[in-house]
């Protein structure tokens, strides 16, 4: 798997909302969870990772779906 592979689990127009979601996701994984602002915009992405194993990504995506926490997608930094 390439380096710097993350799972984007959300995007929010409020830093506070993104931080709350980050904290919820952090309770579900041992991977780092961080806020990634979009330069020049009031949008904050929530990323988990980096991952080095596709199985870890799949497992987290299943967990998020089971908890009704929305869809996620893979991103590379």
Image: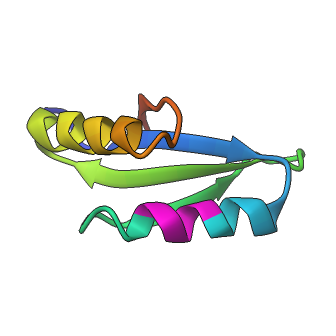
State the predominant SS element of the stretch in magenta: helix
Residue 10 image point, x, y percent:
59, 43
Q: Left or right: 59 with respect to 72?
A: left
**Which residue is depicted at the point 57% across and 52% down?**
46
Against 64, residue 50 (above or below) is below
Q: Does the magenta stretch include residue 24?
A: yes
Q: Give residue 55's quadrant in the image.
A: top left
Camera sees residue 77: no
| Residue in front for this viewpoint, 39 or 14 | 14
Q: Does the magenta stretch include residue 31?
A: no
Against 76, residue 52 (above or below) is below
| Residue in front for this viewpoint, 71 or 57 | 71
Camera sees residue 56: yes
**Quadrant into which the N terminus falls:** top left
Q: What stretch is highlighted in magenta?
A: 21-25
Q: Give residue 6's quadrant in the image.
A: top left
Residue 73 image point, x, y percent:
44, 28
Q: How many marks?
A: 0
**Which residue is depicted at the point 89% across and 50% down?**
42
Q: Left or right: 71 with respect to 74?
A: right
**Quadrant into which the C terminus falls:** top left
């Amino acid at each position: 798997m390439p380096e710097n592979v993350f799972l984007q689990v959300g995007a929010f127009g409020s830093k506070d909302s993104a931080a709350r979601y980050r904290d919820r996701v952090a309770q579900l994984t041992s991977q780092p969870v961080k806020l990634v602002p979009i330069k020049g915009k009031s949008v904050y992405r929530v990323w988990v990772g980096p991952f080095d194993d596709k199985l870890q990504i799949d497992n987290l995506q299943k967990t998020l779906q089971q908890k009704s926490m929305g869809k996620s997608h893979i991103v590379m930094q």
